[in-house]
Image (cartoon, rainbow, N blue to C red):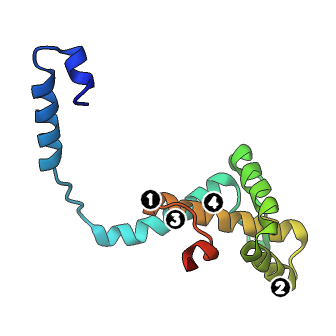
Amino acid sequence: MATRLPKLAPRMGRRLAEEITQALGEQTVVVVGTNAAATVLPRLAEHLAAYAGLAPVTRRSGSSIRGEHPSRRGNKTLKRALFLSAFAALRDPVSRTYYDRKIAQGKRHNQALIACARRRCDVLFAMLRDGTLYETEHQLAA
């Protein structure tokens, strides 16, 4: 900013840059209801999964409830990207263990992959929420 503003405003560029930097340093953000954030943030993860079409949907008709099935709604492009990402992640030992556990629970291949995609969606949301990069267990141990 200190190099750009003098080019745009030669007479007062440096002074503006200093004033902007000082004003930004003095700003504070007070968040009202931080306890509410603990309730809202997990719901946002669920909404992201629903938006991607990875959240299970209960099939209902009147008083008849027929169980859960994969959603046909949601962002098809995002769902496909997460599904293919989960399929490629089967080479990762952690993801493969999760996939094998789902298969052992009686899930079919596509059901287990959708569960892996949902898990990747949750991890992606946590990365966005915390502002962190993805780290494998091997990277964390090092």
Q: Which residue is mark 2?
A: 105
Tag nearer the camera, 1 or 2: 1
Whether residue 24 is visible here, answered yes or no, is: yes
**Which SS class for mark 4?**
helix
Looking at the rendered structure, the kind of residue marked 1 is: Gly
Q: Give the image location of residue 141, x and y in percent.
A: 57, 80
Q: Which residue is mark 4?
A: 49
Res 131 label: 1
Ranked by sequence position, the earlier of labels 2 and 3 is 2
Q: Is residue 5 above or below residue 76?
A: above
Looking at the rendered structure, the kind of residue marked 4 is: Ala
Ranked by sequence position, the earlier of labels 1 and 4 is 4
Tag nearer the camera, 2 or 3: 3
User: What is the C-alpha distance between the residues marked 1 and 2?
Assistant: 33 Å
At 75% from the left and 69% from the top, the residue drawn is 115
Tag nearer the camera, 4 or 3: 3
Q: Are marks 2 and 3 in contact (CB under 8 Å)?
A: no
Q: Give the image location of residue 139, x and y in percent.
A: 59, 72
Res 126 label: 3
User: What is the C-alpha distance between the residues marked 2 and 3?
Assistant: 26 Å
Instruction: Tell me the crowding category of disc 3: few under 14, some 14 to 19, or many 20 or more residues within 10 angstroms, Cα based.
Output: some
**Which SS class for mark 3?**
helix
Q: Is residue 92 above or below residue 22?
A: below
**Which SS class for mark 2?**
loop
Looking at the rendered structure, the kind of residue marked 3 is: Ala
Instruction: Tell me the crowding category of disc 4: few under 14, some 14 to 19, or many 20 or more residues within 10 angstroms, Cα based.
Output: many
